[in-house]
Image (cartoon, helix red, strand yellow):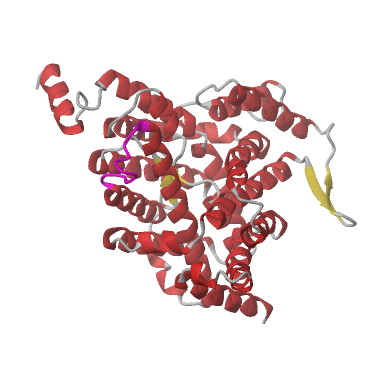
Amino acid sequence: MSSEARTGLLDRYFELSASGSNVRRELVAGTTTFLAMAYILFVNPSILGETGMDAQAVFVATALAGAFGTLVMGLWARYPVALAPGMGLNAFFAFTVVLTMGIPWQTALAGTFVSGLIFFVLAVSGIREAIINAIPMQLKLATGAGIGLFIAFIGLKNAGIVVPDESTFVALGSMTRPETLLAAFGLVITAIFLVRKVRGGVFYGMIITAAVGVLTGLIEPPGAVVGSVPSLAPTFGEAITNLPELLSAQLVIVVFTMLFVDFFDTSGALIAIANQAGFLKDGKLPRARRAFVADALATMGGAVAGTSTTTSYIESSSGVASGGRTGLTSVFTATFFLLSLFFSPLLAVVTPEVTAPALILVGVLMARSLGDIDWSELEFAIPAFLTVIAMPLTYSIANGIAFGLLIFPLLMAVRGRWREVHPVAYGLCLVFLAYFGWLAA
């Protein structure tokens, strides 16, 4: 087939001309999106590696989950939206589910798979609209912001900027420690990139921080830049093997939290990107069901491969800003995810000090939703505040969500606005009341 014929085929399938785009513009957009979110290839293995999971296998699972989900989104839903294991959900997986609750990572992967399966059913059935309406926007915003603070706290801890203290629980670490200075340098450099609106700024910040660490002798140089694809065997299929382990009240809360965060994270990202690109028609997103199904399939596929929940990335907006208007943008992004499989040797230089700036600044980006919360309405502000503050202070995303959804119906009832609360929210209130009772038992 000639190049003209291939171009014509792509034009017809992705409706490039009708969208005012072309193959070159979609390639530039796909490259831009990949660079903006490429940090997850190295941050995700670093976070999930805390649980004892094989970092090399997680690297492969991350790349494959990103490639698979983004391809489905591009080829089927035909949107310029990329997917990868989500920030926040990976922290919940590692630090709450595994390290705090003591659930084996294999069982946590099974929970991730089940949450994806439920999400799939909700997506194809159309029930998602009812659930979205059940949770007030204020608590959706608070959940995103709270996860941002939680991620930033982890980054500050990994950098050595925040350390444990017997008297005050936490304190300022030694700012003259070489590793802490390296993390502080990375934080400043990455912040400069973001302020200057450099696309892929977080990724470039990690590269420069790692390079400085190698040059100063704080980080051992990698044995190679390009290598063979690592084995996926240490994590592949564990989600399916451990499905029988999910029959407990504790895992019900885990699955619900994964589902809850992914549900609204995906919704928010898709609506924001669609609005930016001009896809919304009468306030609705065409082919929305396909987009949600793509997200659910990516979560299930990622869990089987060996990673936490895969979700739509708001960084896709950088590709849209570069002119991406069709699913071809996502196809190019997915191709880069597949090519990245050969760069696993670089994981050796991605130390906690290198990833700490990325965690802190991604936390900043997520915390922006605090400004959209209506703090003048205390029946919303109090649950929102408890949701936000409980996540970093209890080291648990689930606890934050539980606090907010537990007190919200009560305050609305006291305020005389109980009819405005969706019945599902009352049901969730009872679920989390039982959750805290179970924790105290």
Q: Is residue 404 above or below residue 428?
A: above
Q: In this view, does 135 lie to the left or right of 292?
A: right
Q: In this view, does 265 lie to the left or right of 292?
A: right
Q: Is residue 310 left or right of residue 353?
A: left
* Residue 246 on image: x %, y %: 46, 72
Q: Residue at x 49, y 38 (%)?
A: 41
Residue 426 in view, yes or no? yes
Q: Give the range drawn in magenta.
A: 277-287
Q: Residue at x 35, y 40 (%)?
A: 67
Q: In this view, does 287 lie to the left or right of 271?
A: left
* Residue 142 on image: x %, y %: 59, 53
Tell which residue pokes out farthest to the bottom in this image. Answer: 441
From the viewer's side, name the closer residue of 142 and 344. 142
Secondary structure mostly seen in the magenta stretch: loop
Q: Residue at x 46, y 35 (%)?
A: 315
Q: Is residue 125 above or below residue 72?
A: below
From the viewer's side, name the closer residue of 332 and 261. 261
